[in-house]
């Protein structure tokens, strides 16, 4: 798959089926391709970072998720455009990862953003 949109669609399908590791690989590929296209600090990366961070939370890859979500938070704070999710939600998720409450908080966050 060479098309970024196709990778994201495939990743979303895998995620829905519970195939999180495969979905994570697809999200990573899509992020790398988008970074090459727009640069590493572009606001268009927000959705890619969010998807990857959330799947890493689901996989309990807390260190990786924290890095990705912190990068997303920085991007959101630097970007003036509105997003479907706000920086405060990301702050809460990062705090929950650091405090070891990510399962409860992740469920609440996903329910709130669904």
Image: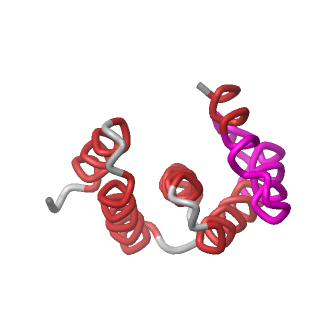
Question: What's drawn in magenta, residue-wise?
Answer: 79-106
Number of numbered discs visible in the structure rendering: 0
Quarter of the image with the N terminus is bottom left
Q: Is residue 34 left or right of residue 59?
A: left
The residue depicted at 58 percent of the width and 61 percent of the height is 60
Q: Nearer the viewer, residue 56 or 71?
A: 56
Q: Is residue 34 left or right of residue 65?
A: left
Residue 102, image x and y in percent? 72, 52
Quarter of the image with the C terminus is top right
Residue 86, image x and y in percent? 75, 41
Residue 53, image x and y in percent? 57, 58
Q: Is residue 101 above or below residue 89?
A: below
The residue depicted at 52 percent of the width and 49 percent of the height is 47
Q: Nearer the viewer, residue 3 or 80?
A: 3
The residue depicted at 29 percent of the width and 45 percent of the height is 14
Q: Is residue 67 left or right of residue 10?
A: right
The residue depicted at 72 percent of the width and 54 percent of the height is 76
Q: In the rendered structure, does residue 98 fall within the stretch colored magenta?
A: yes
């Amino acid at each position: 798959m060479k098309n970024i949109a196709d990778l994201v669609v495939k990743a979303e399908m895998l995620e829905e089926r519970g195939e999180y590791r495969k979905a994570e690989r697809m999200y990573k590929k899509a992020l790398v391709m988008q970074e090459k296209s727009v640069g590493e600090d572009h606001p268009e990366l927000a959705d890619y970072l969010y998807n990857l961070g959330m799947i890493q939370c689901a996989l309990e890859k807390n260190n990786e998720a924290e890095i990705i979500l912190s990068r997303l938070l920085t991007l959101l704070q630097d970007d003036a455009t509105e997003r479907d999710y706000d920086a405060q939600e990301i702050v809460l998720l990062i705090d929950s990862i650091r405090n070891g409450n990510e399962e409860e908080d992740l469920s609440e966050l996903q329910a709130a953003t669904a």
